[in-house]
Each structure stands twice: as C-alpha cells, then as structure tokens.
C-alpha cells in the first residue's frame, strides 16, 4: 500500500483548549512497574501511541495480565510480583521505541528470565551499548549484533548491588540500571554527570521502593536504591506529555493572534527545558493552576502569538528537552537573530539523525542553517516568509521520525510555504491524534493524494 503524503498549509490564528496525550516516559514506567508489582495497578490517561503499546505487549509476554477498563480511559495491570516473570515465547518487538526497549532490557536483566529484543529498521540501527555495557559490567550475560538489535539478555536472577558511574546524563541508562537492581541485596548506587529525567525515581518511591537522590558537591547526581525492593501496586495518573505539548506551543507562538490553552501538562523540572527556552525567546507562555498528580507537578499552559528573538542554549539544558530541539529550531526560524544550540550529539542517534533532518527541513523553505557534529545554528527571519501557498510544496524527509514529521507540519502552518511530509503515519508512535487536535485549534492539514483534510 502506498503512503499518502500529508501537507501543512499556512494557517491563521490558532485558538482553543487542548489536552495532549499522556506523557510517554511516565506511561512506559507505569506499565513496567505495574507488571513487576504485587497486586493490581490502575493507570489512568496512559498514552496510546505505538511505542507505549509495544511496551504493554512486552509486559504481557513477560507474564503480566493487562486489560483495558470499561470506560476506555484506564488500563488495569495485574503484576507477576514475587512469583516472577516468564520467559517470552517470541522476541519482544519494540517497533521504534528506544525508551521501551532499553528500560525493559534492564528489567529483564534482574528477573532471571531469558528474552530477545527486536525492533524496526530505525531502532535496529540505534546503539544499545549505552545500556548493555553497564549491565554486562554487573555480570549480566548479553548477546547483540555489534551493540545493536537484535539483542538477547540471559537474566540470571538478582545481580550484585554495586556502584555504577555513567558517562552521560541519560534517564534510559539510569532507569535500566535501577530496574535491573530491584531484586539486588544491598544498596545500588548510580552516579551520573548531571541530573537526568527522574520519573523512575519518583515512581519507584510511589510503588514502595526506597530510593534516595542527591546532587553532589561537584554537580554530579547520585541515586541510591535499597534492595531487594518489594513493589506494591498503586494507582497512576499519567499527566499530559510536555514533549507532545511543544508542537502546539510552538505553532501558537509563531502564528500571530493565536491564543491556546493546554491542560494538565507535566511540569517536572527535568522536562520543562523547551518552555524555559521559549520564554527566554520572548514567548508569551503563562502557567497556572499548578497542582500535584501522582508524585508529579502539573499545570495549565496558556500560549499566545509572540514576537521572538534568537537565543543560545548550552549543553546543560539538553537532558530536559532532548526531544524538543527539532521544534525549537522551527521556533528559531521565526525569531529575530541567531539561535545557537550546543551539546546536541545525542540527536545524531535518535529515530533519525535529527540534526541533519532538521537542517534539511529548514533549508528547504529558505532558512539559513548551519550545523556541526553536536551543534545547530539557525538564522531567524523574525516573521513568516516564503512564496504563495499555491507554490510547489516543499518535501521534508523524516526517515520515519515522528518528531521531525510534527516539526515539519508546524513549519508549514506558520510559513507561506506548503510543507509536505511523505510518511505522516510515523506520528502515531507518540501522538496518534496530532492532526485532529491541531485541526481543532484551526490548523490546516491535508492528505495530498485524496484532497481531504486529515
């Protein structure tokens, strides 16, 4: 079946209220901890993108019973708890999900079962050694294709409680090590160069694990887990995903006269880098109704069309917005002056080479962009630009990367160039309702082959 390309047409004044999907990072972890816990965990607001659903299928294969609630807003996970997991009969297929596959590798390493891991072409080309090497150093037997998928992990039961020092601030690495060590006897210590996303630590505490975190005198971050940890089922309410929220936020900031409100967005400080940078650029972003939800802070966010200016971002902010740099680059294209983004080496090994794809996308509509191995520089125009909307559409190569695809669609909404994405289906990995949600705010999206708005 041929892929129908989607196009974003110039749009004017986005307005309305919206709740973006549940946070993907928290959704993965809720399923994993619910599967390992004793009892029945009820998850409300689970994100239903393909990445999360692949983790859900993996938990079923490992022995958890997972069913959807009668109201369609909840999932109920009956964990295998103390009885232990079962070795899956077939490889666990994670599709395009790097977070899911790396976290579950850590989980399996400490469970005493054997499991193989596979994924799509994109995921199979992404490095897994950042997780496999520290697991191997703890005595876990692993087999891989030169550090990539397919991978087999031969879990030998509880691993020794040890101290691991990681070379990068990565929530995936930290979380994999924590999950691998839940049944270890003694104190497991993980020291990372800086604080990465701390959803695992927060949720582990909610499930009854003893976890302590602190920033050391030299700026490094230390997490200590006392084991063995006996997890107990607990309700989880998944807040709205700030990474998904970044796309309507950017669209509203770039389109004059826009005024939108996003409800119940996660405000964990390890995830709000994009909002912080957008405000520094002059973005009118008001945060209100701050409240607690499942150990996390959430709030409503009002965004209005704004006059933006270029800024510089430094490597220390990357962990809090690593997935948002393609859409930040789109925002920078509409700002006055230069936006320099540094410390982006991680973007080279995401679902695509996001530095290369972002550079090509912006150059395609006439924006001046330069890049290096770990940096991206955008010369902003300060306004909308381009030719008539009736001009030949600008094709954007995404390599199946959902965040590049959504960034391209936002670019087309705010500029006077029709931007075309050949594989919009990849957006479903994280935000299946993106087209419908943006259209409800006033966006003009179209399926080119059929002439019908998508």
Image (cartoon, rainbow, N blue to C red):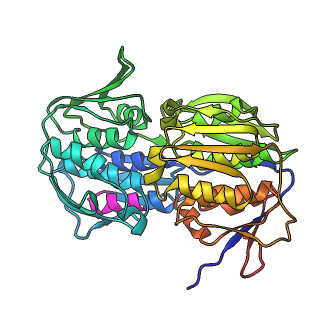
On screen, residue 405 versus residue 443, left or right, reads: left
The overriding secondary structure of the stretch rendered in magenta is helix
On the image, the x and y values in percent for residue 254 come to 78, 46
On screen, residue 123 versus residue 410, left or right, reads: left
On the image, the x and y values in percent for residue 78 come to 34, 52
State the residue at coordinates (61%, 68%).
424
Q: Quadrant of the C terminus?
A: bottom right
On the image, the x and y values in percent for residue 97 come to 42, 58
On screen, residue 3 versus residue 226, left or right, reads: right
Between 4 and 453, the one nearer to me in the picture: 4
Q: Is residue 26 visible?
A: no
Between 138 and 203, the one nearer to me in the picture: 138
Q: Quadrant of the N terminus?
A: bottom right
State the residue at coordinates (76%, 60%).
439
Between 139 and 238, the one nearer to me in the picture: 139
On the image, the x and y values in percent for residue 369 come to 65, 50
State the residue at coordinates (62%, 59%).
360
Query: Is 241 located above or below residue 293 in the figure?
Result: below
Q: Is residue 176 magenta?
A: no
Residue range corresponding to the magenta coloring: 54-64
């Amino acid at each position: 079946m041929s892929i129908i390309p989607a196009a974003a047409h110039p749009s004017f004044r986005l307005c309305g209220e919206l709740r973006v999907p549940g946070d993907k990072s928290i959704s993965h972890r809720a399923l994993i901890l619910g599967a390992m816990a004793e009892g029945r965990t009820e998850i409300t607001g689970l994100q239903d993108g393909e990445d999360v659903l692949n983790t859900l299928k993996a938990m079923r294969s490992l022995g958890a019973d997972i069913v959807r609630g009668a109201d369609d807003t909840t999932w109920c996970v009956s964990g295998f708890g103390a009885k232990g997991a079962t070795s899956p009969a077939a490889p666990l297929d994670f599709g395009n999900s790097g977070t899911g596959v790396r976290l579950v590798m850590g989980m399996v390493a400490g469970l005493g079962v054997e499991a193989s891991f596979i994924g799509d072409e994109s995921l199979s080309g992404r490095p897994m050694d950042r997780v496999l090497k520290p697991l191997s150093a703890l005595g876990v037997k692993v087999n891989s294709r030169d550090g990539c998928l397919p991978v087999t992990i031969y879990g030998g039961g509880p691993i020794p409680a040890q101290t691991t020092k990681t070379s990068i601030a990565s929530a995936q690495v930290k979380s994999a090590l924590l999950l691998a060590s839940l049944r270890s006897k003694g104190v497991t210590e993980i020291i990372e160069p800086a604080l990465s996303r701390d959803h695992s630590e927060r949720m582990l505490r909610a499930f009854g694990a003893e976890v302590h975190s602190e920033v050391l005198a030299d700026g490094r971050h230390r997490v200590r887990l006392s084991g063995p940890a006996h997890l107990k089922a607990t309700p989880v309410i998944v807040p709205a995903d700030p990474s998904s929220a970044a796309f309507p936020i950017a669209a509203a900031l770039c389109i004059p006269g826009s005024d939108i409100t996003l409800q119940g967005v996660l405000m964990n400080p390890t995830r709000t880098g994009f909002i912080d940078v957008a405000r520094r650029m002059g973005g009118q972003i008001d945060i209100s109704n701050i409240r607690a939800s499942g150990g996390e802070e959430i709030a409503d966010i009002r965004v209005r069309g704004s006059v933006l200016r270029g800024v510089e971002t430094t490597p220390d902010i990357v962990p809090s917005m690593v997935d948002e740099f393609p859409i930040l680059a789109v925002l920078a294209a509409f700002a006055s002056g230069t936006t320099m983004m540094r410390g982006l080496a991680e973007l080279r090994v995401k679902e695509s080479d996001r530095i290369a794809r972002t550079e090509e996308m912006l150059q395609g509509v006439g924006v001046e962009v330069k890049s290096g191995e770990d940096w991206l520089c955008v010369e902003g125009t300060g306004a909308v630009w381009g030719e008539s909307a009736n001009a030949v559409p600008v094709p954007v190569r995404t390599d199946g990367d959902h965040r590049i695809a959504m960034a391209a669609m936002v670019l087309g909404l705010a500029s006077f160039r029709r931007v075309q994405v050949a594989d919009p289906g990849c957006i479903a990995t994280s935000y299946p309702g993106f087209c419908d949600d943006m259209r409800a705010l006033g966006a003009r999206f179209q399926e080119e082959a059929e002439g019908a708005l998508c």
